[in-house]
Every structure is written in C-alpha cells, then in structure tokens.
Image (spheres, grey):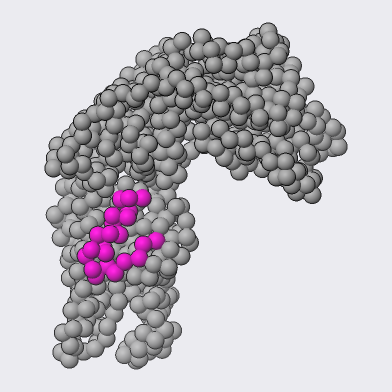
Amino acid sequence: MKNLWNDADAEKMVADYAKKGVGRDLALRVYTTRLLGGEPRLVLHGGGNTSCKTKATDLVGDEWDVLCVKGSGWDMAVVEPQGLPAVKMGALLKARSLDKLSDEDMVALQRSNLIDPSSPNPSVETLLHAFLPHKFVDHTHSTAILAIVDQEDSKALIKTVFGDSLGYVPYIKPGFDLAKVAAEVFDTDRKVEGLILDKHGIFTFGDDAKQAYDRMIHYVTMAEDYVARNGKPQAAKAALPAKLAKPSDIAPTLRGAVAVARGEGRFDRMISDFRTSDAIVDFINSAKIAELAGRGVSTPDLSIRIKTGPMAVPAPDADKLDDYKAAVRSHVDAFVKDYTAYFETNDALDDVKRTMLDPMPRLTLVPGLGMFGHGRTLKDAKIASDVGEMWIEAVRGAEAIGKFHPLSKADLFPLEYWSLEQAKLASNKPKPLTGQVVLVTGGAGAIGAATAKLFAANGAHAVIVDLDPAKAAEAAKAAGNNSIGVGADITKPAEMRAAFDKAVAVYGGVDILVSNAGAAWEGRIGELDDATLRKSFELNFFAHQSAAQNAVRIMLEQGTGGVLLFNTSKQAINPGPKFGAYGIPKAATLFLSRQYALDYGAYGIRSNAVNADRIRSGLLTDAMIASRSGARGVSEKEYMSGNLLGQEVTADDVAQAFLHQALAERTTADVTTVDGGNIAAALR
C-alpha cells in the first residue's frame, strides 16, 4: 500500500489550522486521519478511528490533558478538528482500575468528561486509545489484515506474518473489556509497534502522527505482500446461463422481494444500488459463492451495514425470467428465515429486551452480473455496495491463503444488537415516503418542480423528467435527497422508456408516478387543424398513457403496489372557450386514470387525478393569463383569484394534493380539485 505522507502537505495543514486556533498535534491528527480515511481498503463508512493525546483549554481557561478521538458520525476521509472531540484523560485512565463498566456507563463517562459538551459521542474504542501510552494511535479494518485474521488458525498465521512486531488480542466486543485486554497485551511486550485484533482489525501507534501512520501502512503492506506471495488459485467457477438477463431485467423483482411487508398492502421499501466490475463478477462467479456469503461478515462492524452477510442468488437466465422471480423470492424467504432464527436463538440467551431489526438482506450477489446494495435511502444502498466491494476483497484474500473463517454469528450478535445501537435506531423515524421513488414528468415546470421538492422533503427520491435536461437537473438539485434529472421528449415512447430505465438503474425501480407534463393550444374546436389537435393528444393524453404503462410494468415486477397520479386539469370537466385542444385530451386522461384504478387495483396499484386550475406555470404564462382573462371578460387579478375562496392557487397547493393522494393508502379512482372552489368543476 502506498504511503501518502507528504511533508509539504502536512505542514500546510498545520499552518492553515493554526490560523483557526488549532494546535499542531490536532492538525497533524486530522491530516493522517484523512489519509487513512480516504483509502477504502483501510477505512469505510465509519469504520476505524484515530486519536492523539494533547492539551486543551476549557471554557473557564483551565488546561487539561486530553484525548482527541474520532467522534461518532464523522467520516475519517473528510474529518475536521471538531470531529475529534477532546476528552479529559484523567477520568479515562482512572476507569482502567474498574472491574466492569457497562456500555451505557462508558458512554456517560466519556460524555461527562468532554471539554466541549456539544461534541459528538467519542468512539466506542476511546478507552482502548486512552489506555495505550502513545501520543498517536491509529485503528483500521484493513482488508489485507482481515485476510490474515479471518482464518481458523489466525493466531499462528499472525505470528508467521508479523513475527513479534505486533501484539495479538483475541476477539472481544469493542468497549471496556476489549480496552483492558488490549492494554494488558501491550504491557506484556511494550516493544510492539501495534496490535492485531483477531477477526477485527489492526492498531498502530507512535510518538508522532507520521510514525503511527507509517507503521499502519508498513504492516498493511506486509499483509498484502504475504497474500500475494502465498495465494493459491481461485475456486472453480459456476456455470452461467447461455443468455444472461440484464441488471434492469431483475432489479425491480429483487427490489420488491426485499421490501418489508407491513400487512394489508403496506411495505417498507428499499432503494437498490447496482455495482459491477470485472473483479466483482470474477469473484461472485465462484461455484461456492453462496457458501462464502453464508459464513458471515469480514469484520464485525459490517453487521450494522449488511447484517449477517450477503445473500447470493442464482445467475438470471434471460429466457426464464418468470422462473427467476420465484427463485429470488425463495432465496429472500430463506435469508429471512435464517436471520429470524439467528435473532431468536441469540436473543434467548439473556433477559435483555431487544427489538429485531427487519430481516431483509442488505447486499445481494448475482453471478454473471454484479451486486445490489439495498437500503432505505440511496445513501444507505450505496454504503452497502461499498461494503460489499471490501467484503469481496477481504474474502478473496482469506480464501487465497487458507479458508475464510470470520467471527461466528453468535459472537456477531452482541455487536449488531448493541444496546446503544438499538437506542439510536429507535429514535430514527423514517419519513412518510422513505424508500420510495417518484418519477415526475414535466418536472422542471412550476407544478412538477414543487411536487418533486415536496415528495423529496417527505423522504422520496425523485426522478425529474423534462424536455430540457439542464432544467431537469436544476430542479433535481433544488429538490435534494439525491434526486436526479432526466431529459426526455415524453411524446416519444423510446425516450419515455429510457427515463424509466434510468430510474431503475439508479434506484432499482419506481413506486409513484406523477404524470404532470402538459401544454395548451388555443382555438375554436370547429376551426382547429388536425395537426394541432393531434399534437395536443400526443402530449396531453398519449404521453400520460405511455408514462402509466411504463410505471405499471415496473410496479408489477416489484409486486409491492404503487401509485399513479395524473394532472388532468379542471378543463377535463369544465371546458373553457377556445380551449378544446387542451380540454378534450385532458378529459380522456381523467378517464384513463379511472381505467387504471379499475384494471390494477387488485395488484395494489392506486390511480388518482388532480384537477388544478389557474396555476402560474410554463403552461399558464403571463401571456396566457392575459388571453384567458380577456376571453372571460375579467381582469388578470380577478381571473387568477376567481374562485369561491377569492385566493390565487399556487403550484405548492397542487403539490400538496398530489402528496395527499400518494399517502392516502385506501384511496383510488379519486379526483381532487385544486382551484380555490369552482362549483362548475366540482365532481360531487
């Protein structure tokens, strides 16, 4: 592994932070922490931690000896000084004399001794850092080190690879007990330059930041070199179908299979992130990939990301996709059954009250294609995929020099169900649309953009489709929540299909369609040329049908229901003069929404419509407002507020109506009027 230390970069960081009142010790701690955190083979998504022992001054000016240690929630790759909260050393060192200390009391001890009480919780391994006497301490979950320690005879192999340079610490769950044992191991031979934690990772230390970092890179490189020199040929490959299905062919099926059923047609859905490369495919094409996946995770902290390990499914045959659906469901059912048994067996060993996490896999390996990370958000799904890549690297190395033998699932259980993690999960309340994907046509317009933004604020990931790709991207950025913009002419079926394909590629599927795009042409119907009327029908009717067909296709594959929402406009039931080219196809779209409700209600797919009127937008421009108000013989202000409430209706009001329909789980074939009150447009 390349050593990335650079004297000039280090000194620049020291100088830059000095201007902000940050001392040299902490500045260099930030520097090397970022070097470690930026390498996924060492540190990934919260794994690993670093510390330095220095001095800090509290709010009343008293100076203390402190341990600055990585705080919970901080990414080492981008850590700032505040991500290394300072804890008073005296109390931490005094804790070593205790015979026992619960996790809750350990956290309380650490928090009560923070210099800044607003700091994040210090790492669960804070005491281990404190009990070691060195000024700088580094800890990673190097995949090369894991290849060495994830062996049945790991202690002997560690001795072979590293000699007496590193101390050996048997596996103990992170916390007080591990800290005490690790310190005792160091005390038996204070010449060691680091500690190997069996089934876990590596600690290195030094008198300065560079020494601790250099030692980490040195010993990780030794592990890499050992694996490279002693690796044996890979296992035999599994036979693949003559014609493999594409990832997009199976993504909705897989996404639907891992959704958590909450009863009566309700689901907690997942987002899926597909990941592939030559290295990934080469590994998961192993004939024994299912057995390797079943052995578990390469380091215990991964259980928080991918539970007890990946799920392996068969390679998909493009000519037998119906059979593949059943196979996927069968594998998910087996994973759920095994996970439930794992929980019940281990939970019964004591009287601690626990809540079982949802039992769905978070990483699926698909021979021939790649892997899918699953999570309640795109961020979580991507993290699962990232973890999957490092799991593959660690397992590949372990199998090359022996047999992958990770921590037993019985020993994994106390970490996955750590009381503090349970408390954190209990306080994490998902938003109403968390895990769902909404596709909005006409998404860069006033109504579309407002709807996408509101749905994203309620937890959904939005696919914003618009004729102008730049405006679609701009609207996606404004919506937030990892939404995306897609440019498409939705009157062209191939481009509509491509927009939905993009939703599948990025998120794994679609749950909600807001078919919103439209445009108006004026003229008396008896004098309107056919080309104009047909053009209007293409956008104001057939594009809605095309969008709904694509959405239903995906929703049926997912098997978790869905929602179709149509913007049909009040013109569908209350036509205006010289507006037939717009109102007639909109009337057809209104009945289209009801037909979908009728034909697909049995599959849990709901279909509703919103009749909006007089919304300032790309359709109802200032020029159009002037024209329509003139046609009705009223002022522009009177036209825009010409309703029973006497108030102008906005795009945000329409967005609220769409959100209501999306959340109304027992409502279908509904038409909601959003116009401030117009008796002529009222349906009931």
Against 540, residue 38 (above or below) is above
Nearer to me, 512 or 319 = 319
670 left or right of 120? left
298 left or right of 665? right
Q: Which residue is drawn at 74% across and 16% down?
A: 94
Against 111, residue 546 (above or below) is below
Q: Residue at x 27, y 37 (%)?
A: 368
Residue 488 shown in magenta: yes
519 left or right of 200? left
Find residue 125 and report its horizontal and vertical position in percent.
61, 24
Residue 654 shown in magenta: no
Find residue 120 and report its horizontal and vertical position in percent.
64, 36
Q: Which residue lies furthest to the front in this view?
A: 229
User: Secondary structure of the magenta portion, mostly?
Assistant: helix
Q: Which region of the structure is painted magenta?
A: 485-506
Residue 513 visible (yes or no): no
